[in-house]
Image (cartoon, rainbow, N blue to C red):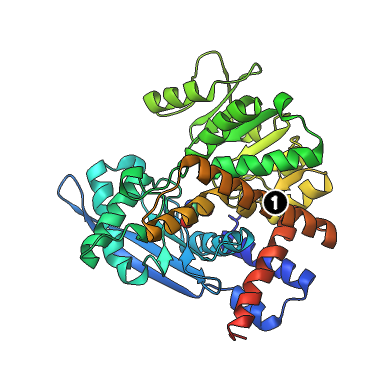
C-alpha cells in the first residue's frame, strides 16, 4: 500500500466540505494551497566536531483571520507535505475556536532521540536564524509540537530576542513559566480534549466514572490525557502505548507511575503487572473511549471496521484517514475530530500571546475557565452543524471553520 499523503487528505477533506456548503470556487482554489512557505538548510556542528546539514520548513497556510500560528515538529519522517497538511489544519483549528489567528506549521527532519541537548539547542537557534525574518509576535508565532518542548521554545525565543536586540517573549508560545509562558499551557491540549470528551459522553450516554479508555502515544498529550481522565473523571485507563509498544491492565493503570517508569526506562513497556499489547491491537480494544495521541494515519480503512470504542477522541493531528472516517461514521462511532479535540493547546497558546502583549499574567484558574468556555462552545457549534447538515463531526467542523475563513477573505476583498 502506498503511504497516504496527508496534504492530499487535507485537500480531499476541504473538497468535500466545499461541495456541501457550495463554497465560492475562488475561495476554494485559494484555500487548497498554502499562502507561503520557506525551505531552509541548517548546518549544525555536531558534538563529534562534524557538520551535519538538516532540512527545515515553515509553512504559513492562510492569514485571513490574523497572524499565523502553529507548532514546530522535530521528526525523522517529516516532509513538506506533512507540514503543509498540519498548517492547513491549524488554519481550521484557529477558525473553529474563533481565535483571531491564521494557521502555520514548521518542521525539521531530524531525530531528537539521537541528539544531545547541545546539538538540539544549536539546531533550535539555527532554525530561528533562518526563519527569523519570516516570523514575529504579530506575524507568525510558532509553538511546541511532536518532539519539541518548552526548553526548545525558550532557546528559540532567546535567539529571536538576540536578533531583535530586545526581549520578544511573544514570538513563540509554550514557553517555560519563567520566561513568559502561560499557566495551564503544559496540559492544555489534553485538558481541552477532555472537555470535548465530556460533551461527547453526554451525547453518547456514557458515564465517564465507569468508562474505560485506551490511549495511543504517551508524549505530552497522551500522558496528560490519561492522567486527567483518571483524576477529573474517575475513568479507568486500561491501555497506553508509545513507539516501542503498549501495556494493558484490565484493572486500570496509574498514569503517573507509568510516566515515571517511561522517564526511567525510555518506554511504557515492561511496566509491572501489565500485559504487553501492540499499538495495532490497542486501537481495536473493547473500550468506551479511544484516544489516538501520537501521529497521522493510524486508523485506516483496514482497521476501522475493528474499532470497538464508542468515542474516538483525536488528540493527535490526522490520525484517521478519510476512508476510515466513513467506516466509523457508518458504524456509529462518535469521532471528535482532531482540530476540535486537540485545539486546547493553541487556545492556551493564544492566551499566552495575549498575556505577553499585555505584560500581565493570569492565574491557572482563569486559564482553565477560559479554555473550558472556548472549547465547549466550539464543540456545540460542531454538533449543531453536524445535525443541520446531516454530516459527521469532521465535516461539520470543516463547515464551521471554512465558512469563517471564507468570510474573512470576502470582507478583506480578496475575492
Ligand atoms: N502544536 C499544537 C497544535 O497542533 C499547538 C500549536 C500552537 O500552540 O500554536 O495545535
Is residue 102 among the parts visible in the rendering?
A: yes
Q: Choose between 47 and 370: the one closer to the eye.
A: 370
Q: In which quarter of the image is the C terminus?
A: bottom right
Residue depicted at x 47% and y 62% = 69
Estimate the x, y position of residue 127 in percent, counting from the top left: 30, 60
Taking 319 as reference, is 399 above or below it?
below
Mark 1 element type: helix
Residue linked to disc 1: 379
Quarter of image, res 176: top left
Taking 60 as reference, is 152 above or below it?
above
Is residue 42 among the parts visible in the rendering?
A: no
Estimate the x, y position of residue 277 in percent, counting from the top left: 59, 26
Estimate the x, y position of residue 42 in percent, counting from the top left: 28, 61
Query: Label 1 neighbourhood size at 10 Å, few (<14), some (14-19), many (20+)?
Result: many
Estimate the x, y position of residue 43 in percent, counting from the top left: 24, 60
Q: Is residue 130 left or right of residue 25?
A: left
Residue depicted at x 63% and y 45% = 314
Residue depicted at x 61% and y 30% = 232
Quarter of image, res 201: top right
Amino acid at each position: 500500500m502506498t503511504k497516504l499523503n496527508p496534504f492530499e487528505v487535507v485537500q480531499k477533506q476541504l473538497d468535500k466540505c466545499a461541495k456541501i456548503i457550495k463554497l465560492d470556487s475562488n475561495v476554494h482554489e485559494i484555500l487548497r494551497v498554502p499562502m507561503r512557505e520557506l525551505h531552509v538548510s541548517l548546518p549544525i556542528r555536531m558534538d563529534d566536531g562534524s557538520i551535519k546539514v538538516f532540512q527545515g520548513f515553515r509553512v504559513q497556510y492562510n492569514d485571513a483571520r490574523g497572524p499565523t500560528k502553529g507548532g514546530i515538529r522535530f521528526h525523522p519522517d517529516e516532509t513538506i507535505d506533512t507540514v503543509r497538511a498540519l498548517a492547513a489544519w491549524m488554519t481550521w483549528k484557529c477558525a473553529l475556536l474563533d481565535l483571531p489567528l491564521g494557521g502555520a506549521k514548521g518542521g525539521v527532519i531530524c531525530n531528537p532521540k539521537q541528539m544531545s541537548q547541545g546539538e538540539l539547542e544549536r539546531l533550535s537557534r539555527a532554525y530561528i536564524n533562518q526563519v527569523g525574518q519570516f516570523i514575529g509576535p504579530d506575524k507568525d508565532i510558532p509553538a511546541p509540537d511532536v518532539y519539541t518542548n518548552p526548553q526548545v521554545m525558550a532557546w528559540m525565543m532567546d535567539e529571536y530576542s538576540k536578533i531583535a536586540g530586545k526581549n520578544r517573549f511573544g514570538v513563540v508560545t509554550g514557553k517555560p513559566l519563567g520566561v513568559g509562558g502561560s499557566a495551564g499551557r503544559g496540559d492544555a491540549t489534553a485538558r481541552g480534549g477532555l472537555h470535548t470528551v465530556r460533551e461527547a459522553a453526554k451525547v453518547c450516554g456514557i458515564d465517564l466514572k465507569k468508562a474505560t479508555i485506551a490511549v495511543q502515544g504517551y508524549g505530552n498529550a497522551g500522558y496528560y490525557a490519561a492522567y486527567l481522565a483518571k483524576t477529573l473523571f474517575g475513568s479507568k485507563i486500561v491501555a497506553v502505548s508509545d513507539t516501542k509498544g503498549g501495556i494493558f491492565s484490565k484493572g486500570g493503570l496509574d498514569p503517573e507511575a507509568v510516566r515515571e517508569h517511561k522517564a526511567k526506562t525510555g518506554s511504557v513497556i515492561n511496566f509491572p503487572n501489565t500485559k504487553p499489547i501492540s499499538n495495532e491491537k490497542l486501537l481495536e480494544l473493547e473500550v468506551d473511549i479511544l484516544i489516538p495521541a501520537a501521529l497521522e494515519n493510524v486508523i485506516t480503512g483496514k482497521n476501522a471496521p475493528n474499532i470497538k470504542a464508542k468515542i474516538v477522541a483525536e488528540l493527535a493531528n490526522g490520525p484517521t484517514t478519510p476512508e476510515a472516517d466513513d467506516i466509523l461514521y457508518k458504524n456509529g462511532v462518535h469521532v471528535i475530530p482532531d482540530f476540535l479535540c486537540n485545539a486546547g493547546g493553541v487556545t492556551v497558546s493564544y492566551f499566552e500571546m495575549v498575556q505577553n502583549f499585555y505584560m500581565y499574567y493570569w492565574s491557572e484558574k482563569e486559564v482553565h475557565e477560559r479554555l473550558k468556555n472556548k472549547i465547549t462552545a466550539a464543540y456545540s457549534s460542531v454538533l449543531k452543524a453536524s445535525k443541520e447538515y446531516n454530516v459527521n463531526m469532521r465535516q461539520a467542523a470543516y463547515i464551521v471553520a471554512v465558512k469563517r475563513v471564507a468570510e474573512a477573505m470576502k470582507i478583506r476583498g480578496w475575492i
